[in-house]
Image: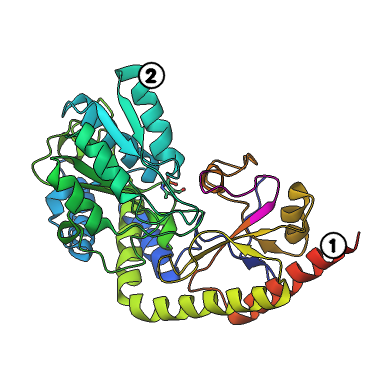
Amino acid sequence: MVIFAPMEKGVIYLDNAASTPMDETVVDSMVQCMRTIYGNPSSLHNHGRKARVLIEHARRSIAGCLGVSSAEIFFTSGGTEAGNAVLWGCCKDLGFKNFITSTTEHPAILGTLDALVRHMGARVHFVKVDSLGNIDFEHLDTLLLQYPRSVVSLMHANNETGKLLPVKHVAGICKRYDAVFLSDTVQTIGKFRLDLRQLGLDFAMASAHKFHGPKGVGFMFIKSGHLLQSFLSGGAQERNMRAGTENVCGIVGMARALDVAMQRLDEDCVYIRGLKDEFVRLLSDRIPQIVFNGDINAGSLHTIVNFSLPQWKDPDMLLPGLDIEGICVSAGSACSSGSHKGSHVLEAMGVDPSVSSLRVSFSRYNTIEEIHRFVEVLSNLTCRTSDI
Ligand code: PLP
């Protein structure tokens, strides 16, 4: 039997880029929905209509937060499905054969592109990335000159290092070559005030569990005029764009989570940036050998820090050592379900693969005391090993 317990006291959860604890008001809205809304949103009777009204209300609210029309928001099971649907749609329905991306993208994008190469004869071109995770815009320009009318897929914030992409700049480059631009915005929606239309994006994607909403629900933004077909077959839901009965309570929770995130955005940004700055300062002080991976300043997301510990000789023992102390962090990315393969992102940035690296990611629920305790535990652990 699975035992559900509230977050244990003493546990320090610093893996918010993998998933976030749910906001209490989100839980309340979902429980209320589960108790009262049981009709199928496609049913024409009263109970079906109630569910439909909630979905459309959520769509309007989400679209309003992102400066787009509700007709441009389509609900999915999360970021992975959104990325698959957009990229497959670009290939199958819009006839794109060339895709430009980087080796530091999330597997949701890289895996899909790999499938398009194998099944659809698509061609993928990788733009160069430097040791800080910066995309080489001159190289992007060169690739687009060679392959105009491509799909460019570059993420807004890297989920392992937090490195940010100037999306508006990239959108401008894409426009010059008649290319379309998908940005994986899974790590940034709910963290910034984004106007997707003003940024010049053609496609974007989101996942509710990254902004204190439920798991297994997300959405894709498809700019009006891009006529993609449904990725799944067998139903006319989401205006023929995503077959299958909608996750009504998940959608309600996601809209609530985004609304809360936007309302508290400014104070949360300042607070979390403060946690990150203090963390970086303390770590540099206590473990002078530490090497930060990527950009830890304004060019990176306030919620993520990635670093290597050159003196730590046994990468497989670091996470369990922290886990015993009740500290949850991630080695590189935790998104590929517990696989302990080295990080493809750090590899692309030229980080020594034999060195232990950690990703620490914060949310509004973390405290300065937790940061102090984590640095204390980590410096004790690393001190002990360097004595061996
Ligand atoms: N893209 C990025 C940048 C992510 O961090 C994740 C998260 O795991 C995904 C895509 C996949 O999202 P989901 O977990 O909703 O499938």
What's the CA distance linking mark 1 and mark 2? 47 Å
**Residue at 29% across, 38% down:** 245
Q: Return the x and y of residue 102 as percentages of the image width and height.
A: 39, 42
In-front residue for pair 319/200: 200
Q: Return the x and y of residue 116 as percentages of the image width and height.
A: 34, 25
Q: Is 192 placed above or below 249 here? A: below
Quadrant of the snapshot with the C terminus: bottom right
Q: Amino acid at mark 2?
A: Arg
**Residue at 35% across, 59% down:** 253
Q: Is 128 placed above or below 9 here? A: above
**Residue holding disc 2:** 118
Main SS class of the magenta portion in the image: loop
Q: Return the x and y of residue 17 as percentages of the image width and height.
A: 50, 58
Residue 352 disc label: none
Label 2: element kind: helix
**Color theme of the render:** rainbow
Quadrant of the snapshot with the N terminus: top right
Q: Residues within 10 Å of mark 1 (few under 14, many from 20)?
A: few
Image quadrant assignment for residue 139: top left
Is 285 on the left or on the right of 33, as rendered? Answer: right
**Residue holding disc 1:** 386
Label 1: element kind: helix
In-front residue for pair 71/383: 383
Q: Which residues are magenta?
A: 348-357
The answer as to whether callout 2 falls within 8 Å of ligand 1 is no
Q: Amino acid at mark 1?
A: Ser
Asked whether 349 falls inside the magenta stretch, the response is: yes
Is 48 on the left or on the right of 1, as rendered? Answer: left
